[in-house]
Amino acid sequence: MTVMVTDHRKQPRRRGEALSAAIHQATLDELAEVGYAGLTMERVAERAKASKASLYRRRPTRIELVMEAAYRSLPTANAAMRQAVVTGAVGAGRLRGPW
């Protein structure tokens, strides 16, 4: 089986929020697949179709990269939890939080 790898440098350059979003999603996907112990900056960069330098400019360590990705995913998780409470999917009495 032949795997084709596209060189990210031949594609239009992403900047700002588009690149940050790709990096954070790649970090979360990599965490889900291999866990923290197996997560590498190189694999996150490859998955995000970005350079390792762009990752290191934003977050110089693996823990910082993971913490930011997790933090950025929290508003989505909180919104989903609030919706579950509103629709009755989860009993409100069993949850603690500022709802």
Image (tube, helix red, strand yellow):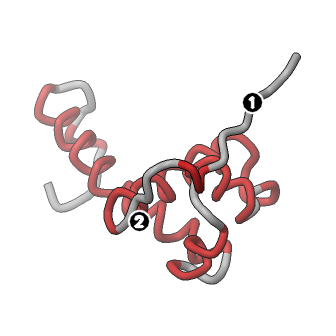
Q: Give me the C-alpha separation between circle 1 and circle 2.
A: 33 Å
* Residue 26, image x, y percentages: 56, 50
Which of the marked residues, 1 or 2, is nearer the chain's N terminus? 1
Identified by mark 1, the residue type is: Met
Reply above or below: 90 against 39: above
Observer-nearest residue: 5 or 38? 5
Look at 26% across and 40% down and name the residue there. Answer: 80
Residue ID for mark 1: 4
* Residue 46, image x, y percentages: 67, 51
Corner quadrant of residue 74: bottom left
Observer-nearest residue: 42 or 34? 42
Identified by mark 2, the residue type is: Tyr
Residue ID for mark 2: 71
* Residue 50, image x, y percentages: 57, 59
Reply above or below: 24 against 11: below
Quadrant that contains the C terminus: bottom left
- Residue 75's tag is none
Look at 27% across and 31% down and name the residue there. Answer: 90
